[in-house]
Image (spheres, helix red, strand yellow):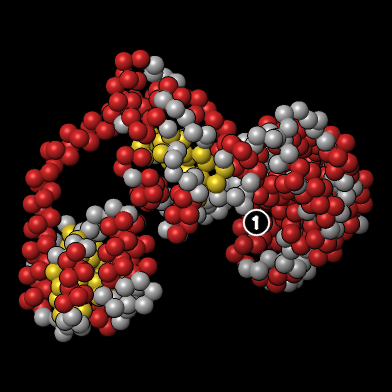
Amino acid sequence: MINILVVDDQKHIRDGLQAMLHQFPLELNNIYSAASGMEALILLRQHNIHIVITDIMMPDMDGLALMAKTKEERIEVEYLIISGYSDFTYAQKAIELGAKGYLLKPLKREDLQTSLEHVWQEIQTRQTLTYNMQHVSRLARETDRKELRMFMQGALNDEAWILQIQEQNPSLWHNYRLCLLREKCWINQPGSSSVHSMEAIAYSVFGRQGCVCLQHSPYLILAVDAAIDPDALPAALKEGMIDAITVMTDSQQGLKMLPGSYTQVHELLQHSYLFPDQYIILPAAIEHMEQQWQLPYEELYELFQSVGTDDSGKIAQGISAIFHKNVLQRYHIRYTQQLCGATVQMMEEYERVIRPYMGEEALDLESLRNLFDYPGMRDYIQALQQQLLRLNQFYFEYKHSYRNSQDLNEAIRFIHESYHKPLDLAMVSNHVSLNYAYFSNLFKKNIGKGFAEYLRDVRMDKARRLLAETDHKIVEVAAMVGYESYKSFTRAFRLVMEIQPTEYRQMMRQKVEREVQYHSTNI
């Protein structure tokens, strides 16, 4: 199945080419389209495209520049050039860059079909001829990569093997850095991974002999030529519109240093959380960090003194001050981890006190255990602040629990006064100015039944009196006690009394008649 990309800055030409392609007897998989060279480059990085049909003259990035860029990034794709210019210079440049055809506008249907079939046949033939060789080569590379990864992680240590691998690429292993790439993402918006594009860009910067991929997941880890400027890779990633943090170790000499480099690169990765605005983290960034500290317990205690008040702004300001980047960047990352742990521990102590009063509501403190579960430090602080503000709200309601009796009395009075109106738990909790979940739990705990059951019983009590003492129709009684429909009223009445409203009215009238007859007989 063939994937084709059509590139032209004129929409009617793109649409016309796509319509023409669908008419050809080709096994088409996907036809992509782009209005510029830059847009096409992004699609080529994201998808496995076999053939690009592109105009030469386009704004932003023309067809020849697109060809040069994909060649530079080692993106394997074949090109057919279409142009309104018959100038030999354009054709010559296109052929130098590897174009398989140069077609002039207005485009003839049969010329395009012939060119496409020729290119597709060439691709299939090349794939068939090289499959076995690629398969064997791939197995060898995968074996070497797996063994290198195991050695890097400390699971393999064989002197003969180390010498053998080192001899395969002596120029790299003589002077290399370990490089880890962490793609930036926003919480709840992870997006699609660009790991293969990052790898391709790294190879374009360091060359095939100056770059070896050791790991793809969870982070891309490469051994790269230490002689190349470390800033070259972040600059290339930025140019390729990939938002990623580059972490690099010191230069190392010899494959034996790889396990130690692996430890160092992970330590640098953790410290990258302290420098959210930097795109490259080198060992120099953490060399002068202090290794001894005292956690700011007094500031934490002062912060938690505000929990349970209506001053949420003070809490937000307190968190920002305690976790200020200028403070965190003074110390090793362990300081930040310990500070996170101490804050969560204090939140747990406060939550333990009010947990019985929280009902089904709960804080998600488990999500705050590990800083590195978040895309960045800012995301963690935001989540921490959100949970602390929720704790503050719960604690505020708990500290004002002395109002429980007064609030419940007012709620019951309001129910008895408003039972004949549309009424729900939210309306009553708002009336007494209490949190919905807190009020629900408080009501059931003190009244002995839930709000819905209590309201139903109040309405049924009023309905029994109306049925027994008045001549109102059943449908009128239903409306008078707050039910919107006759059916819902009779269902509720039958559930409580185990008889229909009409049967209850008849029973009560017969009872009155018997009492009247009794009194008449005994006068």
Residue at the image position 8 percent from the left and 65 percent from the top:
117
Few, some or many C-alpha atoms within 10 Å of disc 1 (few <14, some 14-19, many ≥20)? some
Q: Is 85 displayed left or right of 299 in the figure?
A: left
Q: Is residue 453 above or below residue 170?
A: below
Q: Is residue 436 in view from this perspective?
A: yes
Question: Horizontal and vertical percent for residue 488?
Answer: 62, 62
Q: Amino acid at mark 1?
A: Ala
Residue at the image position 26 percent from the left and 33 percent from the top:
141
Asked which secondary structure carries label 1, the reply is helix
Q: Is residue 86 above or below residue 479?
A: below
Frontmost residue, 146 versus 407 = 146
Q: Is residue 22 in view from this perspective?
A: no
Q: Is 130 displayed left or right of 380 in the figure?
A: left
On the image, numbered disc 1 is attached to which residue? Answer: 492
Q: Is 371 displayed left or right of 71 in the figure?
A: right
Quarter residue 61 falls in: bottom left
Frontmost residue, 67 versus 516 = 67
Question: Horizontal and vertical percent for residue 396?
Answer: 85, 48
How many numbered circles does the render carry?
1
Q: Is 262 displayed left or right of 22 in the figure?
A: right
| Quarter that holds the C terminus | bottom right
Residue at the image position 38 percent from the left and 45 percent from the top:
206
Question: Horizontal and vertical percent for residue 114?
Answer: 7, 70
Quarter residue 149 falls in: top left
Frontmost residue, 444 versus 481 = 444
Quarter residue 50 falls in: bottom left
Residue at the image position 11 percent from the left and 62 percent from the top:
119
Question: Horizontal and vertical percent for residue 10?
Answer: 30, 81
| Quarter that holds the N terminus | bottom left
